[in-house]
Amino acid sequence: MHHIDRIPLPLLIVLALFMLGAPFVPEPHLVEKARMLAEGTLTRPIDIFDVFWHLLPTGLLAVRLARRARK
């Protein structure tokens, strides 16, 4: 967990925002995957991996901020 604390917070914020919106055109992957989840078509492993990949920086940011708040 100490490795997460070494990541600069501004870099983590930029990465999280970028990955939440990427790719920006024609629509973000997370919007597409949320629609697929609602329709019940989010079944391919590559699509599930894509969701986790795009949410990874946001998850790291959440852990980093939670650890910072506890100090």
Image: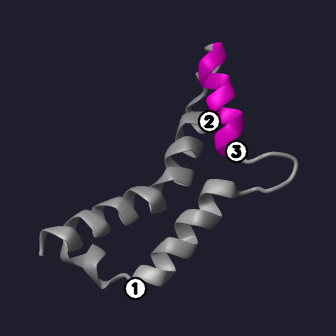
Taken as a whole, is the magenta stretch helix, strand or loop? helix
Where is mark 2, residue-wise? 47
Q: CA distance from mark 1 to mark 3?
A: 26 Å
Foreground label between 2 and 3: 3
N-terminal of the two: label 2 or label 3?
3
Q: Is residue 64 left or right of residue 54?
A: left
| Residue to which mark 3 is pinned | 29
The region drawn magenta spans 29-39
Which quadrant, please, contains the N terminus?
Answer: bottom left
Residue type, mark 2 in image: Asp
The quadrant in which residue 3 appears is bottom left
Q: Earlier in the sequence, mark 1 or mark 3?
A: 1
- The answer to which image quadrant residue 29 occupies is top right
In the rendered image of this protein, does residue 15 appear above or below residue 59? below
Indicate the position of residue 63 as horizontal and vertical percent values.
Answer: 29, 61
Side (left or right) of 30 relative to 12: right
Q: Residue at x 22, y 74 (%)?
A: 68
- 68 or 55: which is nearer to us? 68
Amino acid type of disc 3?
His
> Between marks 2 and 3, how big is the CA–CA gap?
9 Å
Magenta-colored stretch includes residue 40 = no
Task: State the image coordinates of residue 60 (x, y, percent, origin top left).
Answer: 37, 63
State the mark number for residue 8: 1
The residue that appears at 55% across and 42% down in the rendered structure is 51
Which residue: 46% across, 58% down? 58
Q: Amino acid at mark 1?
A: Pro
Q: Determine crowd level at label 3: few under 14, some 14-19, many 20+ residues with C-alpha closer than 10 A.
A: many
Instruction: Please say if 31 is above or below 24.
Output: above
